[in-house]
Image (spheres, coloured by chain):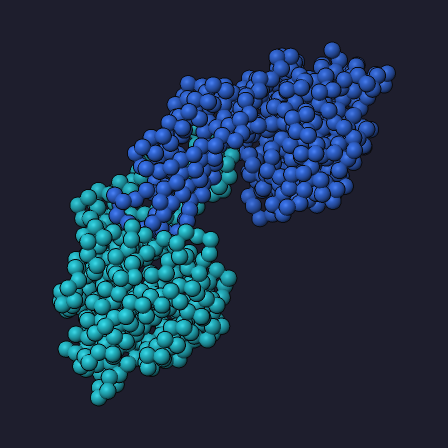
Chain colours: A blue, B cyan
Amino acid sequence: MNVDQERLRADLETNGSFGAVSGVEGRGRTLFTGTESDRRAREYFVERLEATGLDVRVDRVGNIAGQWTPVGCDPATPPIAAGSHLDSVDTGGIFDGPLGVYGALEAVRSIRESDADVGRPLEVVCFTEEEGGRFGRGTLGSSVATGRCSPTDALELVDDDGISLADRLRDIGFAGEDTIDASGWDGWLELHIEQDTRLVEANATVGVVDSITGIANATVTIDGEANHAGSTAMRDRTDAFCAAAEFVLDLERVATEHARESGTTVGTAGELTVEPNARNIVPGEARLELDIRDVDHDRMNDVVSGCRSSLARLERERGVVTELDRYRDVPPTPLSPNCIAAVEMAAGDCDVSAIGLHSAAMHDTANVARVTDAGLLFAPSVGGVSHSPQEWTDWSDCATATHVLADVVRVLATS
Amino acid sequence: MNVDQERLRADLETNGSFGAVSGVEGRGRTLFTGTESDRRAREYFVERLEATGLDVRVDRVGNIAGQWTPVGCDPATPPIAAGSHLDSVDTGGIFDGPLGVYGALEAVRSIRESDADVGRPLEVVCFTEEEGGRFGRGTLGSSVATGRCSPTDALELVDDDGISLADRLRDIGFAGEDTIDASGWDGWLELHIEQDTRLVEANATVGVVDSITGIANATVTIDGEANHAGSTAMRDRTDAFCAAAEFVLDLERVATEHARESGTTVGTAGELTVEPNARNIVPGEARLELDIRDVDHDRMNDVVSGCRSSLARLERERGVVTELDRYRDVPPTPLSPNCIAAVEMAAGDCDVSAIGLHSAAMHDTANVARVTDAGLLFAPSVGGVSHSPQEWTDWSDCATATHVLADVVRVLATS
């Protein structure tokens, strides 16, 4: 099997030109679902699938699959699928998502061009709206393809302009009528950039992911008392922002203590709103959005408990009124031992240095793993940077990781 | 002299109807400079001045003065002026400002109706944009009337829509051509609500202000590193929001320690911006707007020094890069001993319980005190609330404080 680095690079660079952001350091890209850039990226992808001789299907939420059925193989045989997503965050990079989509296509191309004896169909897949950048719900396409979200619910989601996903997909000609059902796949593989520095630090080119982090999201509201910043004495204040400051430091401390033992716990308050947010008014309300992740659900619960204890203390000591609404709780996803073993073996066969690690970011694979055997491979991220124009993975590393992916797909499709 | 409580109340309630905010508890009012509500409030004020027989002038920045020259008095004699402002903060109350304007008018009315032998002209004054609600610069009108800001600079200020004060005033017909020069006044008095609870706690109806707080404003910028909230380990973060949290608690601690001795020190971070402010991204930048006040300039400097020490520590311990830009420094303003004595005596003559105190809020009087003898009286604020629809001062207290104001004006105009 011969993975063609230049062919892969050409696809990734062409794809990176759709929604390209100029005037930034690095290679920026903003690709939101249903935009003109999305239409062009999808049309190019379909063109590349068809140029490889794959049969293309588009489902109701715009997920795209291209299937290759080897000569002499029953097309009804459950296929091995591989892929990722093409959408990006606002001003993201060119690798997060596309590497897995075009890596899968390059893997299938290289398998077809080899004399490998493949006994199953192969599918190259692109899921819609993995980043949640326009409709606010991450891993949306794979949620539908795995039955976790109904197509109707997904299509009724609206963006900030009040336009539905259904309308946005119709606008760009990608509201399909086929069905893409991940539970019908014999196995699934996703290649993705690591978005961290563990591979680089270990001098490895492939990460074999053993589990995907769980995510708890919560909104914390802290009510104090807005008042004049001049005439309200320090001792008479119920400053919601000062209370929020103590809370954030408690969250940081609790997450850091757990991380010291686990190495995998993270807790972040990335979003904050202060009301009325005026220089000369003591803040009356603070709202924080929390993101707590770990590969162990009990530890996630421990961090949330730590947050609740902090808030209870702040109510006693500062007289604020608080609320913690844990509105999302995705438990961690252990990946298939089958796939893990196959990736490890392929890396060995290809003479590629690989290490085992967890994924601290959410991926479509977390959905797919609930309905079939699923594996996730990482390629190295320079500086661990992602969701940024500075996101980078060397072209040779892209090719090497794709080579391992191709080998796993071949082995799984043969066995 | 007979202050007419119902006449005063009618003026304040009518004025409170301009820009009235419905659907809030209490009596809300949003009156920004140059709006239709402002036009109506100003026209009503002019109408009331003229109905009292005063000669009305409007200067280039929309400051309004109504002058009464007693029979037999040389109109060129330096007058005694009294007043305040009619603009409000966003969703403020109906007393902050208007009590001083209509209290001054009621004082002049009651003096005219008495047989007092007044030897100087009296002026009732309304200053433009005291709150800085539309053009971002507080006590703007009095800054111009006292020569601290040129009319041209003031008129070139623009609001959030990019429209200048000059255009806004022209729109509502209050771009005047007269001059209002506070340095030509023999003395100045402002009646204002206390915005604190010291009068209520002391069971007093009038506060005799001995000094107006100084204000230091500063912008603090804390630069960390924005990164993925999932894949960035706790130990690898430079979280700008966590650093800002420590800073805010340091500011609170330093201000509280000083306040324990002085009773007058306050420090507030009322405004905060976090970038990129996304739930799943470790904050890369935090910007805070600080407001530090005291009646002692050295203590203000001590608090700012405490802020700088905190930032230096955070740079060492957290690796953030910080900046503190102290862009405004108004030193405290001691008020005229003459006026203080006159107010104390008037309160005694009127048999009104009065206490001495400082003003922790900025007032137009701080500007006027730099060019002539100036005094400031407080009326009690229920619950200390202000800048809110819940702001309240009992009508009888409004009348009692106005009575004292009238007596001081009479005495100063006679002497």
Say which of B186 and A202 sits in front: B186
Q: Is residue B161 in sight in this rendering? A: yes
Q: Is residue A402 in sight in this rendering? A: no
Residue B322 is left or right of residue A51, and the answer is left
Residue at far right of view: A72
Number of marks in the rendered image: 0
Residue at far front of view: B6
Question: Residue A64, located in which quarter of the rendered image?
Answer: top right
User: Which residue occupies 41% across, 59% down?
Assistant: B29
Measured from the top left, where is residue A259 in percent x and y? 43, 22
Residue at far bottom of view: B72
Say which of B236 and B7 sits in front: B7
Q: In which quarter of the image is the N terminus of chain A?
A: top right
In this rendering, is residue A317 above or below A35? above
Measured from the top left, where is residue A227 in percent x and y? 34, 49
Question: Residue B121, located in which quarter of the rendered image?
Answer: bottom left
Residue B183 is left or right of residue A72, and the answer is left
Residue A337 is left or right of residue A123, and the answer is left
User: Which residue occupies 45% across, 63% down?
Assistant: B19
Measured from the top left, where is residue B219 in percent x and y? 37, 50
Residue A287 is left or right of residue B343, and the answer is right
Measured from the top left, where is residue B4 in percent x and y? 28, 70
In this rendering, is residue A244 above or below A343? below
Q: In which quarter of the image is the C terminus of chain A?
A: top right
Say which of B274 and A180 sits in front: A180
User: Which residue occupies 20% across, 48% down?
Assistant: B263
User: Which residue occupies 68% across, 20% down?
Assistant: A188
